[in-house]
Amino acid sequence: MNNKSKYDFATAVDIEELNNLISMVNADKTHEHTYCRLVEDDFNQSHSKLIFVTRADKQITCFLSLHCKYSFEIDNEGVFEVFAHPNLKGQGYGSTLIDQAEEYAINETNIKKLEIAVLNTNPNAKKLYIRKGYISSGKVRKGEYFFKKLKD
């Protein structure tokens, strides 16, 4: 983690590395183009998206994209996605980023609730979110939504 700040955020310099990680994670390539565009757009939209990263040997091992519909100042709900290097899953990188995103949302924003959609093909992610206190809010076609209330 970056020693200069409490959180290590990705910057525009990281776009290529983030896109490479997305490509590795999306084995079926179904959503790769959409996610790559979103990552590039993250750096052009102030106060609506943040990308938290973990690094090992200066390489990004995992990232979490946290975004709001409008801005962190006015929106009460945040949605996030987590991408971990396939060879490093289960080593705590995603868990660390979820903790950081929750802490940031509580202390630095008006976000009161976080949500994530999990594909049915990812049972380990479902277990992680349940362990972190997320509750299922219903099934969707290819997965399930989870949410966690952070503050009143």
Image (spheres, grey):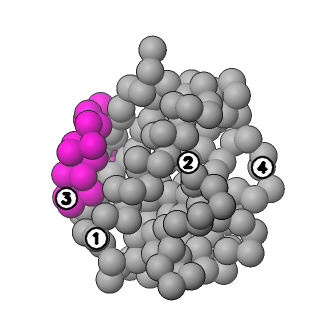
Q: Secondary structure at mark 3?
A: helix
Precedes in sequence: disc 3 or disc 4:
4
Q: In the rendered image, which residue does mark 3 sit on? A: 123
Would residue 152 be visible to someone looking at this image?
Answer: yes
Precedes in sequence: disc 2 or disc 3:
2
Give the CA separation, mark 1 to mark 2: 21 Å
Q: Residues within 10 Å of mark 4 (few under 14, many from 20)?
A: few
- Highlighted magenta segment, given as a residue range: 123-142
Residue sitting farthest toward the front:
3
Give the CA separation, mark 1 to mark 4: 31 Å
Which of discs 1 and 3 lies nearer the camera? The answer is: 1
Q: Residues within 10 Å of mark 2 (few under 14, many from 20)?
A: many
Image position, residue 101 (x, y; %): 49, 46
**Residue 45: mark in rendering:** 4
Give the CA separation, mark 2 to mark 4: 12 Å
Which of discs 1 and 2 lies nearer the camera? The answer is: 1
Precedes in sequence: disc 2 or disc 4:
4
Precedes in sequence: disc 1 or disc 3:
1
Q: Residues within 10 Å of mark 3 (few under 14, many from 20)?
A: few
Q: Amino acid at mark 1?
A: Gln
Image position, residue 2 (x, y; %): 59, 66
Residue 90 lies in quadrant: bottom left
Q: In the rendered image, which residue does mark 2 sit on? A: 66
Q: In the rendered image, which residue does mark 1 sit on? A: 91
Q: Amino acid at mark 4?
A: Gln
Residue 104 lies in quadrant: top right
Q: Secondary structure at mark 4?
A: loop
